[in-house]
Image: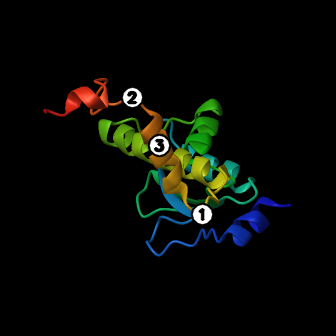
Amino acid sequence: MRRETAYKLAGRHHEHPARGSGLIKQRELRFKAMPPGQVERARQALMTLKGLHVERADRELALVVRYSVLDYSLEVVEDALRDAGFALDNTLYMKLIRALVYFTEETQRHNLISPERLLKQSNEVYIQAWNHHAHGDHDDTPPELREYR
């Protein structure tokens, strides 16, 4: 059975109402000014990838890429560009943005490939685990010695 079929049978939906939280991501790639002409070369190189849509951004040294998080991630795209010799913007702001985007995309991909819990009363599992776990409110004193007579 295909994963999508199992998810539909389990009632799992991947449509998200919030913009930017779905499967299709739109990200901006920023480049350094040197070497000149690298933005256009990067655009041509990225256009050869199936499922990755590339267009020019409003900024001079940037490209906008759109992809499905199931096929690509920003980390994979940027690593491929670095390996090909392109110089990406490496300011502190961009490092922070990259770290956040890498984490969120990795987490989303992990959640999409993990099976959905199909337990009807999943809270019972935690209740049973808690009852069998030795915790602070356990008293080893025998019951007949606990009561004052």
Rendered image quadrant of residue 51? bottom right
Give the alpha-carbon distance from disc 1 to disc 3, as whole Å: 30 Å
Q: Which residue corresponds to mark 3?
A: 103
Residue type, label 2: Ala
Q: Residue at x 65, y 72 (%)?
A: 11
Contact, mark 2 vs mark 3 (Cβ under 8 Å): no
Which numbered disc covers residue 134? 2
Colouring convention used in this rendered image of the protein: rainbow
Tell me: 83 left or right of 148. Answer: right
Q: CA distance from mark 2 to mark 3?
A: 35 Å
Tell me the tag on residue 120. 1
Earlier-in-chain disc, 1 versus 3 = 3
Residue 16 can be seen in this image? yes
54, 23: nearer the viewer: 23
Return the disc, 2 or 3, that comes first in the chain's sequence.
3
Circle 2 — which element? loop
Mark in the foreground, 1 or 3: 1
Where residue 99 appears, as percent x and y from the top left, is: 42, 39
Q: Is residue 50 above or below residue 31?
A: below
Give, as a three-letter code, the residue at label 3.
Phe
